[in-house]
Amino acid sequence: MRRILEAILCIFVGIFLFGIMAITFQVIGEDSSNKASIIGGILSMIGGAIGALGAYIVATYQMNKQIEHEKKKEEIQRKENIEQTLKVLERLNLEVISFTEYFIKEFAKPYNRERIVKLKISESDLLWIVNNINNINYEILKED
């Protein structure tokens, strides 16, 4: 960026010197409408080029700034999504742990017809959860 500013400064100094030289030729030399037109055309062409260069520099600076802002915004949003997903996974992990602890506790007891019925019911619940895991309401899991 500093090199660009130095180049622009050199261009302005060159234009200033060229303008002084053009005014000097106009005043000292013969009065010629052609010479004045040519010098005026050259100066306006250089001024237009400088204006276009300035507009290009400003536009690229703004675009780079906007792209950086969007990247930061996307990164923040990505981090928030990861945090939310981790919260959901943590909650699901706690549910699975409590569910398996329940199963271990139930299997440790002696054989009983009532326990078998409870385990069968729990098995159907577990299958329902496994089959519908993609339909879980993430808002409820985020809020525990």
Image: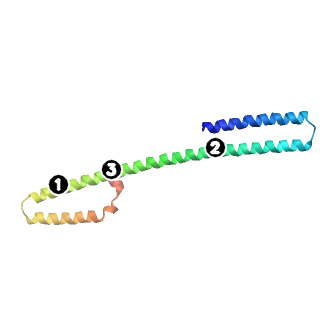
Image position, residue 117 (x, y; %): 14, 66
CA distance for labels 3 and 1: 21 Å
Instruction: Answer whether residue 142 is visible to the viewer in this image.
Output: no
Report the amino acid beneath label 2.
Val
Image position, residue 83 (x, y; %): 36, 48
Q: Secondary structure at mark 2?
A: helix
Against 59, residue 114 (above or below) is below
The answer to which image quadrant residue 23 occupies is top right
Q: Quadrant of the N terminus?
A: top right
Identify residue for label 3. Answer: 87
Q: Is residue 60 left or right of residue 28?
A: left
Report the amino acid beneath label 3.
Lys
Please name which of the two marks, 3 or 2, marks the residue nearer to the observer. 2
The answer to which image quadrant residue 54 occupies is top right
Instruction: Answer whether residue 112 is visible to the viewer in this image.
Output: yes
- At x 81% / y 33%, what residue is drawn? 20
Report the amino acid beneath label 1.
Glu
Identify residue for label 1. Answer: 101
Compare residues 88 and 21 and report the one nearer the observer: 21
The number of numbered discs placed on residues in the rendered structure image is 3
Against 126, residue 10 (above or below) is above
Near mark 3 (Cα within 10 A), the count class, few <14, some 14-19 or many ≥20, is: some
Near mark 2 (Cα within 10 A), the count class, few <14, some 14-19 or many ≥20, is: few
Q: Is residue 59 left or right of residue 124?
A: right
Against 123, residue 144 (above or below) is above
**Mark 2 and mark 1 residues within 8 Å of each other at the beta carbon:** no
Identify residue for label 2. Answer: 58
Compare residues 64 and 45 and report the one nearer the observer: 45
- At x 64% / y 44%, what residue is drawn? 57
